[in-house]
Amino acid sequence: LDLSKYPRMRISLFLLFATMLVTGCQRLPSTVHLSGQLDDFEEGDSVYLYRSSDRLNYREWLAALDTVQLTDRGEFQFTVNATKGDLYQVAGANGFPKFDDVFLAPGDSLHVHVPVRSDSISVSYSGTRAKMYGIYDALDSLWQNDTSFQKNYYDIARMDIDSAWGLIENRYNKKMSLVRAHFEKHPESDVMANVIGKNTYYGDARDYYNYLYYHNYYSKDTFVYYMPENRYYAFIDTQLLTNPPENYSFEYMQFLSGYLRDCFNRDYAELDDSTRYADKFNLMLRTAHAHLSGEALDRAYLSIADEFGFFLERDGFFEKMDSMDAYFSENHHSPSNYEKFTFIKSKYDKLRPGSPAPDLALP
């Protein structure tokens, strides 16, 4: 076909090609940019960028998205590809986050300044949606300015159950009132509102569980296997069992671990203390399946794998991890949860009897 004889067709084909080229470029991943300055740092320190959902426990993560060494002023910059909005964390070599979660969507740029921690100077933010992070200051101020609440909170173990419940519920209502009022001004930040709201909920629910646990222990001078407190279970059922958080929540995992242990102790209250570790491991799995489902059951597998890792030398631990893996690989509800499980298991596998000794780097 000689296009020189058909100029209009030649122009049309050129426009079609140009349109396809532009459309193709638009489908390429965009980027998010996160920079900052840490006032409290050591020369040579490095920081690591993670997705918040890649957190395993208090200080462990899946592989970092990127790593940079701080400048001599404590500055850092990250630019990574992103196809959707997500929560991010920057952590040090010890795994501890340097500041709270930040939400970044493709095209966003945010700068975070983290001063030396004190009651009078707070973390500052500039850039995309920077104003929404004022909720962190508002929640901190609520705690710092309510000295009466602080005093009562530290005395909570001595309170009767109605006073303890009232104190925790009152704090929860105050915090959620702040969260709702703040994010009404920032409706574009519904992801952050959801995460902060749920973390507030799980943190307070965990406090109430801890009160029940320790109050019974100290007041009766004996170990109580479960907490027969209907308000507590009514408080958690709609949230824990039907609506777990989409992103990682350290508060949620702590709370889930306590809930699972409590269900275990209720279901097996007559269990003899001499019961073999291997049997307790199996019964804990049975408890998880009896009380949890879906995403919450996935998280229970992670919690059990992480917690029972402290007993590597006991009663066929590695074989039990293998059996958990065989089931979980076929029955997980979220691929990211199974990825975390395999990460945990891979650390234990390096410690199996007969495995090669780790490399030692001598100075």
Image: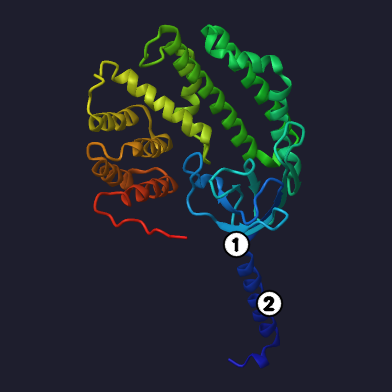
Residue 131 locus on image (x, y percent): 76, 41
Protein image colouring: rainbow
Q: Which of 183 and 51 is in front in this view?
A: 51
Give me the disc on residue 361: none
Question: Which residue bears the numbered disc 2?
Answer: 15
Where 226 falls versus 102 (above or below)?
above
Residue visible at 37% across and 11% down in the picture: 222
Tell which circle, 2 or 1, labels the residue nearer the N-terminal end: 2
Horizontal side of residue 282 vs 111, given as left or right = left
Residue visible at 71% across and 24% down in the picture: 144
Residue 124 locus on image (x, y percent): 75, 42
Q: Nearer the viewer, residue 157 or 332?
A: 157
Q: Disc 2 to disc 1, how far (Cα)?
A: 24 Å
Residue visible at 47% across and 34% down in the picture: 253
Q: Quarter of the image holding residue 136?
A: top right
Crowd rating for badge 1 (residues with CA inside 10 Å; few <14, some 14–19, many 20+): some
Q: Nearer the viewer, residue 48 or 23?
A: 48
Give me the disc on residue 29: 1
Q: Which amino acid does label 2 sit on?
A: Leu
SS state under label 1: loop
Where 351 falls versus 268 (above or below)?
below
Where 136 falls versus 115 (above or below)?
above
